[in-house]
Image (spheres, rainbow, N blue to C red):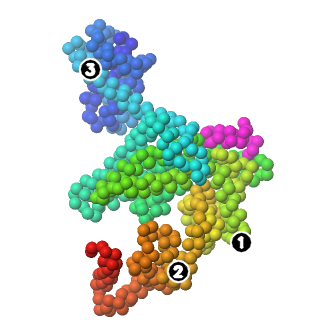
Amino acid sequence: MRLSMKNWALAYLVAAASTTLPSSAFHTPISIARTSRTVSSAANVKSHLNALPSNLENLDLSNFDLANVDVASLTVQFTTYLSTHGILPANISPDQLASSLDPTSLLSELVSPTNSWHAIAIASLATGALLLSLFTSFLNSPDDYSSAPYEPGTDSYDPIQAEEFYKSRPLMVAKRILRLASLTAVFNTGLLFDWLVLGKLLGDEEYTALRKNEPRRAKEALVLCEKLGPTFIKLGQALSIRTDILPEPYALELRQLQDAVPPFPSTEAYDVLRTELGVSDLSSIFSSLSPRPVASASIGQVYRGTLRSNGKDVAVKVQRPGILGEIALDLHVLRLLTPIQTKLQNSINRRPTTQEDIDTALLLVDEWGRGFVAETDYRLEATNTMQFEEAMRKRGLDAVCAPNVVEELVKDKILVTEWVEGTRLDKDASEDVPRLCGVAINAYLTMLLDTGVLHCDPHPGNLLRTTDGRLCILDWGMTLRVPSNLQYALLEFIAHINSEDYDSIPQDFINLGFSPADVSLERLQNSGITEGLSFAFRQLSQGGGPKKMQERVKSEFQERYGADLSDEDLRKAARAEMLERMEAQLASEGVDV
């Protein structure tokens, strides 16, 4: 037992310190037990701690010689460790802690036969700490994302194939779920406390605390997305421009993810470059290459370099190692958790959950996942980039462009394009920015209604104003093919609006799939949608800002309901008429209202 006595002595010192000092002197009780193992000078602490429960009954400390333990040295090691690792508060120095302990008397008390409960307490503490340490080590152990259930590509995402793939890897799935739970626990608890305790239980129908804490929670959400990994960074990017879904403080914070994602080590990126290009020395391809990335995104990061062959400046995009495997696992986990999330959300809103609700939520995950997986196909991104550039040149739209692709350097995990000098459109102070916003609208309408390939990642980080005053659209990894029948339906819809042929719009809604499949044209026409649309579009077509439109709407309401009514009475009259029409429509369909 003499080999493990220093472990016992130090563990006892830790336990004693925890009772000598106020409990606030330690961040967590667990850190005390962890310290007893970390600082010990024994050769194999874990083996001794593992043996403690089974050897406890045979433990004989009566012949333990205190002279063989350098108590002063152990105390100094212990107190210094607590200080350097931030476990001690700033107002307590290592000397103060050491002076508060009487190591000799404590160890004497430890070896006393009448105080065997100390040994039991320390053994329990050390064993519990070991189990927690092993669990933490399991969660933080490196992951193997070298394989994935499907290949990169637009149509390769397959949730059924993923389910079969991960059936043989249950530990991998469980580990990811536990890690997500551990990382999000504090954030979710805070949100729940703001909503349930400070809002619902205290009868605050306005949820004042929830709204007040939004800026702080938004900052926490930003950090959380970065910790959760590329999949959730991409989700944060998508939500950062959706203030119709997400509160504005959250959207504003998450916009930092658009071009400020934490990079992976450049040594790994350079290894990917050497492997993909088939060279041992990158200087044979690039005469210069930035040592650090100039931009980092969820899928990969970009370096600036100069080609040795022609001296052109280029952007070298390198994919994160194992990114497809990581995305595939997260998407599989999201599908597993989606039914639970749907039921919880409906429960909060006091709605019953149907299988249709769950199926719809799963379809949303699959649709998003399909686009995300497509982004990992750099060869497809290169093709999309070149096709857009060619289409714009053919149509004479010279005010918009995409980076020129260096085709011979396009590989599975790297994409090289010519360097584009410019600034983000939303951060540029040039006078022609409003004009370029119009160029952007024209470009996207051209993609939607003409070329049939729509760029689906138009966040501000992907829209640049070049130094020569053009709009450059970056990152063509996520695109959508627009079917020709949908293009025709959209063109007809726009034509009917321009010609004020509002009677044809119900049929347009059916052609576009805006109305449920079981709703007939006659029912849609009788719903009053034509009159509502004609009223809205008539106001929009007359121009002016919100104030002018409000004045025109008020004038029409006064003509219809009475010039002597107040604004509130006009609103009530309009609502009453709308309700009357809805009830009449339902009654005509045999619904008891």
Q: Amino acid at mark 3?
A: Ile
Residue 518's spot in the image, x, y percent?
42, 68
Q: Which quadrant does the N terminus fall into?
A: top left
Labels 3 and 2: the sequence-earlier one: 3
Quick check: 253 above or below 64? below
How packed mark 3 is, by other alpha carbons closer than 10 Å (few <14, some 14-19, many 20 or more), is some
Residue stretch rendered in magenta on the structure: 266-286
Circles 3 and 1: CB atoms closer than 8 Å: no
How packed mark 2 is, by other alpha carbons closer than 10 Å (few <14, some 14-19, many 20 or more), is some
Look at discs 3 and 1 and give the one toward the viewer: 1
Q: Amino acid at mark 2?
A: Ile
Residue on which the image places disc 2: 497
Residue 120 disc label: 3
Q: CA distance from mark 2 to mark 1?
A: 27 Å
Quick check: 251 above or below 147? below
Residue 396 disc label: 1
Residue 34's spot in the image, x, y percent?
37, 28
Look at discs 2 and 1 and give the one toward the viewer: 2
Circles 3 and 2: CB atoms closer than 8 Å: no
